[in-house]
Structure formats: C-alpha cells, structure tokens
Amino acid sequence: MATTKFKGTDVELLGNEVKVGDKAPEVTVVNSAGLADVVVGGAQGVKQLIIVVPSLDTGVCATETRNFNARAAKLEGVKTTVVSMDLPFASGRFCAAEGIDKLTVASDFRNKDFAKAYGVLLGGSVLAGVTCRAIFVVDANGIVIYKEIVPEITEEPNYDAAIAAAN
C-alpha cells in the first residue's frame, strides 16, 4: 500500500499504483477553460508533464502551479497539465486571476478516474477524496519516465528534477 503524509500523519493512497517504466494510463479529465475534455497519459507523440495537486485553493498548490506555469514556458515539445479535484469553474477563476496561461489546468471531479488510475487518490483522512501532490513525466510513447509522490502533502515537489525529466 502506497502512502503519503498530511501534517506528519500517514495517508493511504487509493487506486492503481503507477511506477516508472509502466505504461501511463490514458485518462480524460475536464479542462478549466471551456469544460472541454483533455486526455492525459497514453502515447501522445510528445512528452507530458502531469502535475497533480490537491486543490488550487491552497497556498502550496497555488505556488506550485505558478512555478510550473513559469517553468513550462521554457519547455519545448512538452504538454504540461495540472490535475486537481477542483471544479473547473473555480480553477478557471484561479487561472484568470493568477495569469496561468502556459499550461493546461484540468479537473478530475467527475469520476476520479485519473486519481484512481494513477494511484493518487487520498484515502481515510480529512482530505479523503482529493489527490495527493505528485508529478509524472510520460515520454512520447506513453511510458512513465519520472514519478514523484511528494512525501508530505503540505510541501512543494522537486521542481528541478521534474523539469530535468521533462527536458
């Protein structure tokens, strides 16, 4: 059983654990801009940087998304997507207010298909039902080449390692 921590307490991660070397599950999430379907994972002919956050309505998630928005502008040929459980309307407002325009911000609110397929759904805790904080880099052929489950949900990920894997 995979776990992460929330304020020092172990939290179980539910779903199918995806590991480096695995085929990245292809999952449809909802874009915050226009409620269009967005496919993440699978073989898309380009690298994918998939950033998973619990909610854009928290300081750490907002900071992380702003940082990746700035860094994504420098990545060539990489599809960058932030996935959370936030409603698309709320994440759309966040993007508009924060100038998030170099990456796609999407929601897994409908069926939690992404969270279950990637093993990032938080189980029994006060945050049950949202995602943990994680990063996946998927190569053009749909293989996971980098994964980070941030050990403590309240902390930021290793930006440099994720960007290096995506380059």
Image: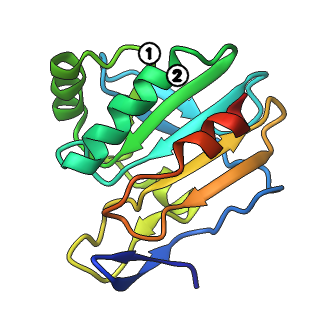
Q: Is residue 86 left or right of residue 1?
A: left
Residue topped by disc 2 = 72
How packed mark 2 is, by other alpha carbons closer than 10 Å (few <14, some 14-19, many 20 or more), is: many
Q: Quadrant of residue 16?
A: bottom right
Q: Which x, y percent locates residue 124? A: 31, 83
Q: Is residue 135 left or right of residue 86?
A: right
Which SS class for mark 1?
loop
How packed mark 1 is, by other alpha carbons closer than 10 Å (few <14, some 14-19, many 20 or more), is: some
Q: Is residue 136 visible?
A: yes
Say which label, 1 or 2, has the lower sequence index. Answer: 2
Residue topped by disc 1 = 102
Distance (Cα) linking label 1 and label 2? 6 Å
Q: Are marks 1 and 2 in contact (CB under 8 Å)?
A: yes
Q: Which x, y percent locates residue 153? A: 36, 65
Which SS class for mark 2?
helix
The type of residue carrying mark 1 is: Lys
Say if 27 sits above or below 99 in the image.
Answer: below
Identity of the residue drawn at 49% across and 27% down: 38
Say if 6 sits above or below 50 in the image.
Answer: below
Identity of the residue drawn at 17% across and 44% down: 57
Q: Which color scheme is applied?
A: rainbow
- For the N terminus, give its image quadrant: bottom right
Q: Which x, y percent locates residue 5? A: 39, 77
Q: Is residue 27 visible?
A: no
Q: How many numbered marks are there?
A: 2
Identity of the residue drawn at 71% across and 48% down: 24
